[in-house]
């Protein structure tokens, strides 16, 4: 039997749930089809270690880009907790480091001075005043129809700032602005989360990544979702259900035809067909191309206009559970302060370039650059009562410059072990004690450490090449010569197929846990009716 709906949404990640809630609130008959047995996609919480009462944000881990408009529109009951400390970065091979304290400018200035980087402290304040002006101007536009490039530039109203952060490689701007190698690296890492790029990136991919990392919320702050990332998706699920959307898990979409018929299979193997006026795609453009090819020969030949762009992730993710925070080589800094923000390891500007060069040549970087987050310091609720009382803490490690090209299906298991060892070695290089000595064990007696390669993310979440953005990020505006003559184009969710819209990270203004792509796809549907 064939069912008919107003809207079918392929994929029940947070963006699909956002779109479902908006459209169901507007009175449309909406069905979400999710392949996995849980909703939320990469924005979930899970007990990663057998028998251990800790719910980790297993994949996505911080929130910055979720607009207050979406929270208010959908009545989401979520708390996003700020982190007092921006970052701590040990100087490699020394017992000192740079601590940036959001609440104590004097302490931050003293930390710069201890590195002999007093001038960079002044440059830091001026640089981030500029990024905040970008944020205040651009972030409010992400839930509106696309501006053109010229309109966005005029809205910013500062040609020098625009040229420095948009037109010129941002790594070049950073090198021109700061003199200290460590300070340069701390600033540039925001251009590399999920993006494989050199320090002087003529493609400007790093600029796009940097821009999204500094405009969130109009401030650029990255906050911890209280209750874990699953609390965010859980609230979106609640909003969609209350609005009347049908949310179907264990439903694998196998084909999409040109007449917008979705063929899917349930967990019992039964086949279903659901047709719709609109199909929203909360999966990657690669997945869309695959299901189109299975459903329609013209789509398979490329006549649909929906080509799957190349996609490659560039990270390895490691989750750890410790009995306490580790001691630092820098005894002047409290570990709770160092791990209270973003803890940078081996991320000086020169180390980042060296790691890129090694990875680009096909080698695992000799020293892995990485960023660490301790969510349990900001949100102890993710730990069970006994773990909280014991002083246990979580660590999430996001390692850079580990592109998917370093992994194959045949080598994934061995390479995972190699990468885990390299990440732990990198971390140990800045600690006063080995991290292994602090790991808790699970119910099976195994150390509480979990490593996910790009290939693992592709297997579990269907992220192409392990790309957390479903491909290259786009600018949050349209080019001046782009047609904006349809709702799908105006809202940045066009696939080239009438009635089929992107609503995931592959859309313009997609990427990160934001709900922006889901909101914008829903607005395009409502505008077209």
Image (cartoon, grey):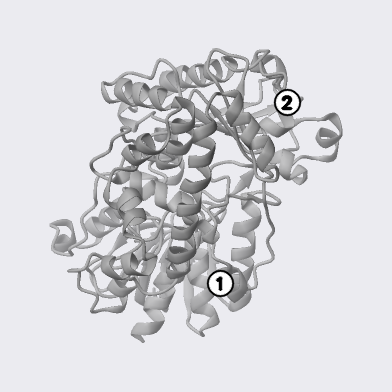
Residue 360 in the figure: left or right of residue 476 = left
The residue drawn where x is 44% and y is 59% is 134
Q: Helix or strand or loop: what does disc 2 sit on?
A: loop
Circle 1: element type = helix
- Please state which of residues 110 and 164 is positioned toward the viewer in this rendering: 110
Marks 1/2: CA–CA distance? 37 Å
In the image, is 160 to the left or to the right of 413? left
At horizontal 54% and vertical 37% (from top left) the residue drawn is 121
Res. 69 mark? 1
Nearest the viewer among 94 and 58 is 94
Q: Nearer the viewer, residue 166 or 341?
A: 166
Q: Is residue 268 visible?
A: no
Q: Which residue is mark 2?
A: 325
The answer to whether residue 117 is above or below residue 139 is above
Q: Nearer the viewer, residue 154 or 370?
A: 154
- Across and down, in percent, residue 198 comes to 31, 32
**Label 2 Cα crowd, 10 Å radius (few <14 / some 14-19 / many 20+):** many
Q: Return the x and y of residue 82 as percentages of the image width and height.
A: 67, 50
Q: Are marks 1 and 2 in contact (CB under 8 Å)?
A: no
First in sequence: mark 1 vs mark 2: 1
Q: Is residue 187 left or right of residue 396?
A: left
> Residue 3, how many percent across, how many down?
41, 76
Residue at position x 64%, y 17% from top? Answer: 431
**Residue 209 in sight from this viewpoint:** yes
List x then y, in percent, for residue 137: 45, 66
Q: Quadrant of the N terminus?
A: bottom left
Vertical side of 408 occupied by 462: above or below? below
How would you rate the neighbour count of disc 1 (Cα within 10 Å): few for under 14, some for 14-19, many for 20 or more? few
């Amino acid at each position: 039997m064939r069912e008919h709906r107003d809207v079918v949404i392929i994929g029940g990640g947070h963006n699909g749930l956002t779109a479902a809630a908006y459209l169901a609130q507007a009175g449309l008959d909406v069905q979400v089809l999710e392949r996995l047995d849980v909703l939320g996609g990469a924005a979930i919480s899970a007990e990663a270690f057998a028998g251990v009462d800790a719910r980790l944000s297993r994949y996505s881990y911080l929130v910055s880009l979720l607009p207050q408009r979406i929270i208010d529109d959908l009545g989401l009951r979520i708390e996003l907790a700020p982190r007092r400390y921006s970052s701590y970065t040990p100087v490699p091979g020394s017992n000192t480091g740079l601590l940036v304290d959001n609440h104590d400018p004097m302490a931050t200035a003293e930390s710069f001075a201890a590195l002999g980087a007093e001038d960079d402290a002044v440059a830091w304040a001026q640089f981030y005043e500029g990024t905040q002006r970008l944020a205040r101007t651009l972030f409010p536009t992400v839930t509106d129809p696309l501006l053109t490039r010229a309109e966005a530039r005029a809205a910013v109203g500062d040609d020098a700032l625009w040229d420095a952060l948009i037109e010129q490689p941002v790594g070049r701007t950073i090198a021109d602005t700061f003199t200290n190698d460590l300070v340069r690296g701390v600033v540039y890492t925001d251009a590399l989360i999920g993006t494989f790029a050199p320090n002087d990136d003529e493609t400007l991919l790093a600029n796009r990544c940097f821009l999204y990392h500094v405009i969130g919320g109009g401030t650029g702050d990255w906050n911890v979702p209280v209750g874990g990332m699953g609390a965010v998706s859980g609230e979106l699920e609640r909003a969609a259900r209350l609005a009347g959307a049908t949310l179907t898990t264990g439903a694998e979409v196998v084909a999409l035809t040109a007449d917008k018929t979705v063929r899917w299979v349930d967990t019992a193997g039964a086949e279903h067909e659901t047709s719709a006026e609109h199909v929203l795609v909360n999966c990657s453009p690669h997945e869309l191309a695959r299901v189109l090819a299975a459903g329609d020969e013209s789509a398979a030949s490329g006549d649909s206009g929906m080509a799957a762009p190349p996609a490659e992730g560039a990270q390895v993710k490691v989750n750890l559970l410790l009995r306490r925070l580790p001691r630092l080589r820098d005894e002047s800094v409290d570990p709770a302060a160092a791990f209270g923000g973003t803890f940078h390891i081996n991320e000086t500007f020169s180390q980042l370039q060296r790691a890129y060069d090694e990875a680009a040549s096909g080698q695992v970087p000799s020293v892995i650059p990485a960023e660490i987050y301790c969510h349990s310091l900001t949100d102890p609720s993710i730990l069970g009562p006994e773990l909280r009382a014991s002083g246990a803490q979580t660590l999430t490690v996001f390692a850079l410059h580990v592109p998917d090209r370093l992994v194959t299906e045949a080598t994934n298991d061995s390479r995972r072990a190699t990468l885990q060892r390299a990440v732990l070695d990198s971390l140990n290089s800045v600690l006063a004690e080995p991290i292994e000595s602090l790991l808790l064990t699970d119910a099976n007696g195994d150390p509480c450490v979990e490593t996910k390669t790009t290939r693992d993310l592709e297997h579990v979440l269907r992220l192409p090449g392990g790309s957390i953005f479903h491909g290259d990020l786009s600018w949050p505006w349209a080019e001046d010569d782009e047609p904006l003559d349809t709702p799908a184009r105006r809202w940045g969710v066009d696939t080239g197929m009438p009635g089929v819209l992107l609503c995931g990270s592959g859309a313009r203004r997609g990427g990160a846990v934001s709900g922006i792509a889901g909101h914008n796809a829903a607005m395009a549907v409502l505008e077209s009716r």
